[in-house]
Amino acid sequence: MALLQIAEPQQALPKKPQRRAVGIDLGTTNSLVATVRNGIPVVLADEQGRPLLPSIVRYGESVEVGYDAQAAQSHDPHNTIVSVKRLMGRGLADLSDARRFPYRFIEAPGLVQIQTRTGIRTPVEVSSEILKALRLRAETSLGGELAGAVVTVPAYFDDAQRQATKDAARLAGLKVLRLLNEPTAAAIAYGLDNGSEGVYAVYDLGGGTFDLSILRLSRGVFEVLATAGDTALGGDDFDHRVYCWILEVSSIGPLSAGDTRLLMMKAREAKENLTLHASAPIVATLSSGETLSLTLTVDTFASITQTLVGKTLGPVRKALRDARLDPSQIKGVVMVGGATRMPQIQKAVAEFFGQPPLNNLNPDQVVALGAAIQANVLAGNRAEGEDWLLLDVIPLSLGLETMGGLTEKIILRNATIPIARRQEFTTFRDGQTAMAIHVVQGERERVADCRSLARFELRGIPPMTAGAARIQVTFQVDADGLLCVSAREQTKGVETSIEVKPSYGLSDTEIARMLQESYAHAADDMNARALAEAQVDAERIATATAGALQTDGGLLLAPERDAIEHALAEVRRLISGEDRRALQAAVDALNRVTEPFAARRMDRGVARALTGRRVDALN
Ligand code: ADP
Ligand code: MG
């Protein structure tokens, strides 16, 4: 469970010179840049005073970003890229809705590529144009180069999507101080402004994604209790419903790509209009010269989008279930994302939680404001004595060495600190009374390819059969990034622990190299892991067989014993080699020849256990 510490509202202004740091909400639909000015987070507007930058890039004579690109989208759909965030870190095969995009995708394995007028573009490049525009806006407005930026991503972004976002920022000339989950950013903005205590839900419905997070706030500390969401649900889907409704109620002929764009734009306008009005006109002239004139009422809009509204409640229920809470235990619901302005969303959320949701910050801006606050802290603009905000992540996974020189990851890379994770391990041999604990850091499967952090031993484990002892190992990383590993034997309660500093001595370049290697070697590592696992398995069977021959050898006839010894020798011969298949075959053969032996030993065991006991005492 990640604990996020948040400062109390701070009035005192820092005296030292400020380093220019910004928070960027790189949205599917709209992007924003914000900064902290005189201790107050503010969104930076463009020269015309507009805070939002539509996340749209057009590859025309020159590259246009934002409103200019938006204006061109209906007449130049192939070269005007919208909702690029949905494509980040994705291959064409990942996109179930590829046909909804009017672009010329390149049919190729790997990440998505789009054919534009000026050549092939990747989603990373398209996003970097948006980020570049925001960087220039911020530099103009703040009067100089930026020290760094915090860029937000949906909580459900996976590693590839996060990496793509980071690459885009780097390509745009930004120093990424950190990627931050959007709901967390919103919570930071609200936490500082309200200083409230209790359990809160963050309901974020943007243009393309839905995120629901449950957070507990107490004395300036946020605890993330649960998150859930849908990466393919947002305001765009409401536009699409309206668009489908237009096609249904009007009898217009085949549409050009430009017509589709135009109608989608009209659909969105109507949707936004209905937030304040009872009905909205939809008027459009199609490329065929045909004109279209319709009126959409609030009631019709509500009925055609009812299922979408309902769809958002699924993740809400799931997150509450995960957090073991019911709606009445939620003290407030923070609304994030432009689409939460829709009255039917407000109503559904209010009904579900039995209270009106919180709207005191602008839902479009709240994520960027929170990111700005975080950026300000990370850039070192903290006043003397100010409580600090902590939101650090673990750069490389932390884990333990298990049998066969393999690593078992306990805390995954990018986990927010402080964090604690617990896992149970067991003994390998009968009667084992000590366990060597080797703490490692890295992404690779083999210990030899990871960085060794510390070794210690847990002694005094009561002797038991292999696999029976339960050793609970706890990894705890505190707010300063200090790792404490403890191991506890569950039956006798013996315990030992050690403190390690996980990132000590690892530079950014080293971290980058280790990550790169882990990607490059993923296939090798899997083979190595399979071989190591087979070796561990073989070792266990060989040891057990040798032990059984020693204690119960008398149960065997000479040829049987010879066959077993032969099979055992074969396993031992192959155990240190590299041929996993041959080893596997030898183990299978050994298992086969020892089967009757095992059955006889078991019968004898039962007979021994029964000796001297009365039959009626057995049930
Ligand atoms: P994202 O985080 O995906 O960039 P935003 O938070 O900017 O998205 O929200 C964009 C969505 O909000 C769009 O679908 C837009 O149509 C919708 N939206 C903005 N204003 C309104 C409004 N007044 N009523 C309804 N929807 C709105
Ligand atoms: Mg958003």
Image: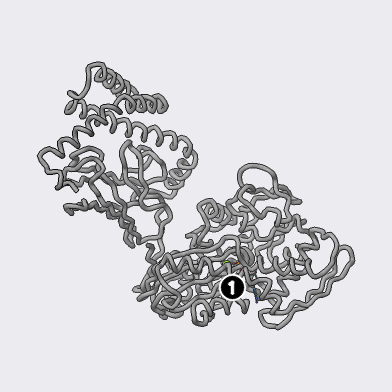
Q: Residue 375 location, x and y as percent? A: 48, 66
Q: Residue 380 location, x and y as percent? A: 42, 66
> Is 568 located above or below residue 209 in the figure?
above
> Is 29 located above or below residue 271 in the figure?
above
Quarter holding residue 604: top left
The residue type indicated by label 1 comes to: Asp
Q: Quadrant of the N terminus?
A: bottom left
Tell me the residue that label 1 is attached to: 364
Relative placement, left or right, of 482 versus 159 is: left
Q: Residue reaching furthest left?
A: 612
Residue located 52% across and 71% down the image: 203
Tell which quarter ligand 1 is in.
bottom right
Residue located 57% across and 76% down the image: 348
Q: Residue 267 location, x and y as percent? A: 73, 70
- Of 416 and 156, the residue lying toward us: 156
Can residue 464 be seen here? The reply is yes
Q: Residue reaching furthest right?
A: 289
Q: Residue 190 location, x and y as percent? A: 47, 76
> Is 282 located above or below residue 440 in the figure?
below
- Of 554 and 15, the residue lying toward us: 554
Relative placement, left or right, of 374 versus 608 is: right
Can residue 137 be seen here? The reply is no
Residue located 43% across and 55% down the image: 414
Relative placement, left or right, of 26 versus 521 is: right
> Is 488 located above or below residue 50 in the figure?
above
**Distance from mark 1 CB to nearest ligand 1 atom below 8 Å:** yes
Q: How is the image coloured?
A: one colour
Residue located 65% across and 50% down the image: 122
Relative placement, left or right, of 514 versus 596 is: right
SS under mark 1: loop
